[in-house]
Amino acid sequence: MTRLLLIGVGGFLGSVARYLLSGTVQTLLRSETFPFGTLAVNVLGCFVVGLVSYLADSRGAFTGDTRAFIVVGVLGGFTTFSAFGNETINLVRDAEPWLALSNVLAHGVIALGAVWAGRATAFAIWR
């Protein structure tokens, strides 16, 4: 029961952080068509999950409850692949196939690269 509560609180915090960061990035870049806010959240979330997973896997840095709070709760609430899917379909629906494809490629390449970068950063710092 404690772990479920930790995940729920983490999800709340991650969701609020996602809303604030995504909106801020979208406003700063003044884009009404490409979802830069969602991309920023996904890349950052992937980077952090890379850091955390490296520390957890190689260093045993987190208890099971702490890892559940951070990875499942905070990062699960923070990353926005459901929003990514919806926004991509909306771009297709709005006859913007090149923006839709750009969105898929950017998330696939940059976000996966961010997981690698997070793990590499953690390795470089805490090896």
Image: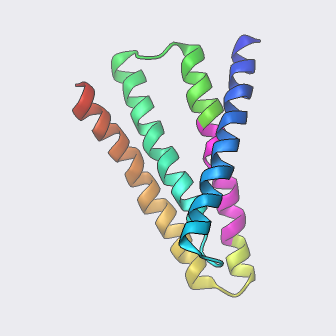
Q: Residue at x 73, y 84 (%)?
A: 94
Task: Look at 60% across and 15% down and name the residue there.
Answer: 65
Residue 105 sits above or below residue 112 on the image = below
Q: Main secondary structure of the magenta part?
A: helix
Task: Provide residue 95's location: percent of width, then percent of height.
Answer: 70, 88
Specify the color scheme: rainbow
Residue 4 against residue 50 in the figure, above or below: above
Magenta segment boundaries in residue numbering: 75-88
* Residue at the extreme bottom of the image, as rendered: 95
> Which quadrant is home to the C terminus?
top left
Q: Nearer the viewer, residue 24 or 102?
A: 24
In the image, taking residue 44 as reference, residue 99 lies left or right, namely right
Query: Residue 86 colored magenta?
Result: yes
Q: Position of residue 114 (x, y in %)?
A: 40, 50
Provide residue 86's location: percent of width, then percent of height: 72, 64
Residue 77 drawn above or below residue 6: below
**Which residue lies at the image location 65% right of the left edge and 78% below the top edge?**
32
| Left-right relation of 84 to 39 | right
Along the viewing direction, whichever of 43 and 89 lies nearer the viewer: 43
Image coords of residue 70 (percent x, y):
57, 28
